[in-house]
Structures are given as C-alpha cells and as structure tokens.
Image (cartoon, rainbow, N blue to C red):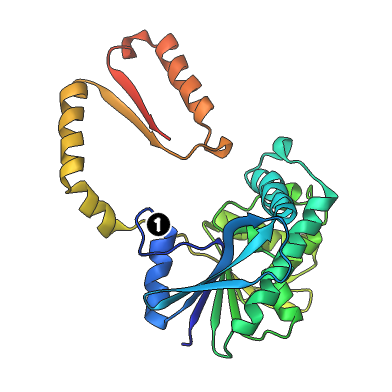
Amino acid sequence: MGRLVVVANRVADPRKPGAGGLAVALGEALRASGGLWFGWSGRTVESCSGNRVHQQRAGEITLATVDLSHADYRAYYLGYSNSVLWPVFHYRLDLADFDAGDIEGYRRVNRLLAHKLEPMLRPDDVIWVHDYHLIPLAAELRAMGCAQRIGFFLHIPLPPRTILAAIPQHGWLMRSLMAYDLVGFQGATDRDHFADYVLREAGGQMQGEDRLHAWGRTVRARAVPIGIDVAELESMARGEEAREMLRAMRENYAQRRLLVGVDRLDYSKGLPQRIRAFRRLLEQYPENRRSATLIQVA
C-alpha cells in the first residue's frame, strides 16, 4: 500500500492535546505510511490570490493547508455545508437555508482544494476524503485525470431520497459520490438510503453485495462505523481526576438515579427536548423529584 493522503475540512496536529478522536485515529494511520493530511487551514483572508499551500511536518506526517477568502468561507462553510447539508442530512428541512450563491461557493472551494492537492499526489497514493464539506472533491480530482484510489467517509447521517430530493441540484451532489471507489457510512440505514437513491433516482444497478453502478461508474458502499478509542478512555478512567470525580459523585448522588448526557452544543443533539422531557418526568411522576438527577455535559 502506498502513502495515505487524508483530506478533511480542517487539519489538526494529532500530537497536540485536544486534537480530537478523529485526529488521533487518523494520526496512527498517517504515521504508518508517512502520510499527508490536507485541508483548509481554518484561516480566512481578504483575498486568496495564489492560494499558497502551507506545509509543516508533524513527526512522520506532512500537514498541508490552504487559506480561504472571507467570501468563500461564508458560501462554502457557513452557507452550503452548514446551512443546507448539515440540517438536511439531519432530517431538519425546516432549518435549511438554500442560496444559489452558496452552492457555487461550495463547488468553487472543492475545485480549489482539488487543484492544490493534485500536484502533491503520488501515483500509488490512497486518498481518503472525509465528510459532507468535501463530497465533490473526488469528481474534481477525476476531472483532472486523477486515477488513484479514492475513498470517502460520511460522519453524519444520510437521509432517505425523499428528503435528499429537496436539495437543489441533489442529482449533482449524489452523482459526485460515484466518483469515489469506496463510500463509507456510519450505519446500514445510511448506506441503504444511498443505495435507494442511486437505484431509484439514477436508474442504477446493484452488482454484488455492496457495489452500485450508475452514471458510468461503479462504487462500493459499505457501513463501517467508527468506534471509540477504548484504550484512551480506560486510561482516563483510571486517572486521579476521574477517581476524584467518581468519589464526589458517590458522595453527592449515592441514593439517586443518574441520567447522564454528553453532547456538543448543536440543534441536532436535541438538548432542549431532553431537558423538557426530564421536566415532564418530574411533573407527571413527582416521586422522582428526590430520586433522579439529570447531568448534562455540553
């Protein structure tokens, strides 16, 4: 196997504290192949004339990033990625904000990233693209003649075709996924939604257990959920800070039932609904008022 090239919206140094589970997991695979991690730098500038690629070494890994203009950031990231794809893919059509300028910005940034990445690629590279921000990236690379193996993983749900069809130019978006060799999803339901779209909207065909053929391309679609870092969590649980927290919780909540939630602040997590449900529990079953506690970390 050749070098692993990871492409994600954001690039993180896996060695730094707080890099996140994905960064740590990818870091292991990247180190093993002396890999390249490429994506947006997280910085916005007034003008991106030239769009220079910034490179640095992180041990055996090369980190390569590109700045975005303020306009591209608004259209690509705040606009199409997070005001259309994020809510629609989470079944929240009511929160989607469609704007023709945003989809053009989304396409433009993916084209820019492809043009900056392509000169850095080697013939035997394996390219692994991550998440909804970069769905069209493989199609842009293929248009430039890129023949390397390219995989894609969607870290959020994929809704059924009846919801996907509400997205303007949804056919172009789903066709872009066919430019990959392998498309991975978190669950079998998401994979089945993709297959149903390809079969019914594009007149595609199933070829074997996990291969779909449509638009002149064949792609493997698989459910390959990402797990947790068990060793890291076990290490944290054995640490002094965790033991002290456990002692405090036993002292304060020894006779109570605990309902614990850990989520980031996002409407897709249903935090207001969770709190309202707990309040309703206490209202309708008052015997729980002295025996149940909700702890929400967000």
Q: Position of residue 112 (x, y in %)?
A: 71, 69
Quadrant, the C terminus: top left
Is 296 above or below relative to 226?
A: above
Q: Is residue 39 rendered to the left or right of residue 97?
A: left
Q: Depth check: give the residue in front, 11 or 154.
A: 11
Q: Quadrant of residue 116?
A: bottom right
One can see residue 258 in this view: yes
Q: Quadrant of residue 151?
A: bottom right
Q: Depth check: give the residue in front, 158 or 70.
A: 70
Q: Secondary structure at mark 1?
A: helix
- Residue positioned 57% across, 54% down in the render: 189
Is 141 above or below relative to 189?
A: below
Q: Position of residue 13 (x, y in %)?
A: 42, 64
Instruction: Give amino acid for label 1.
Output: Gly
Can you identify the residue that label 1 sits on? 21
In the image as oriented, which residue stretches furthest toward the bottom?
123
Q: Is residue 168 rendered to the left or right of residue 188?
A: right
Is 80 above or below relative to 152?
A: above
Q: Depth check: give the residue in front, 224 or 211.
A: 224
- Residue positioned 70% across, 59% down in the render: 196
Q: How many marks?
A: 1
Q: Position of residue 197 (x, y in %)?
A: 73, 59
Q: Quadrant of residue 43?
A: bottom right
